[in-house]
Amino acid sequence: MGYLKESFSLHSFDSYPTKGKKEFRRTKNLCHIRLQQRNGRKSLTIIQGLNQKLNIDKITKILKKVFCCNGCIINDENLGKIIQLQGDQRENVIKFFLEEKIVSKKLLKIHGV
């Protein structure tokens, strides 16, 4: 899975765009995949920015089953639906999205190393 990391820009603490509307439009269609550290070795994988036309409930159900982890969907007023999965599932999610052609490689942005 190391070949995927080279093609993406990896930034550990990218913030949301705040400068102008043009910059927000560029990042609006991106699918962000983040890792959030909890206590000790526990962590969450957060997927945000998926197309709202997709059936996010069904995608979450498949991701949970394929990766043998728990997860949920969070509804946010500004960001839309956000998927949370237990553990560091970033590489699995990237591989799954690219194989199933849910998101193109150009629209994926991975945060954290």
Image (cartoon, rainbow, N blue to C red):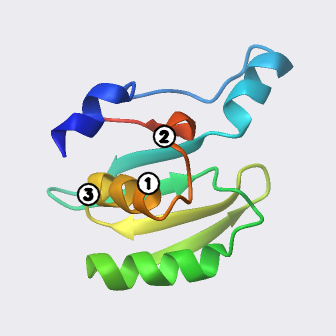
Question: Measuring 15% from the left and 56% from the top, which residue is drawn there?
Answer: 40
Residue 72 shows in this picture: yes
- Between 22 and 108, the residue placed more toward the observer is 108
Q: Earlier in the sequence, mark 1 or mark 3?
A: 3
Q: Disc 1 versus disc 3: distance between alpha carbons?
A: 18 Å
Q: Are marks 2 and 1 in contact (CB under 8 Å)?
A: yes
Q: Which residue is mark 1?
A: 98
Q: Position of residue 85 (x, y in %)?
A: 39, 68
Q: Nearer the viewer, residue 82 or 28?
A: 28
**Hey, what amino acid is under mark 3?**
Asp
Q: Is residue 110 left or right of residue 6?
A: right
Which circle's residue, 2 or 3, is located before the other in the chain?
Answer: 3
Residue 105 numbered mark, or none:
2
Q: Which label's residue is closer to the chain start, 2 or 1? A: 1
* Image disc number at residue 88: 3
> Up-down: is 42 above or below 31?
below
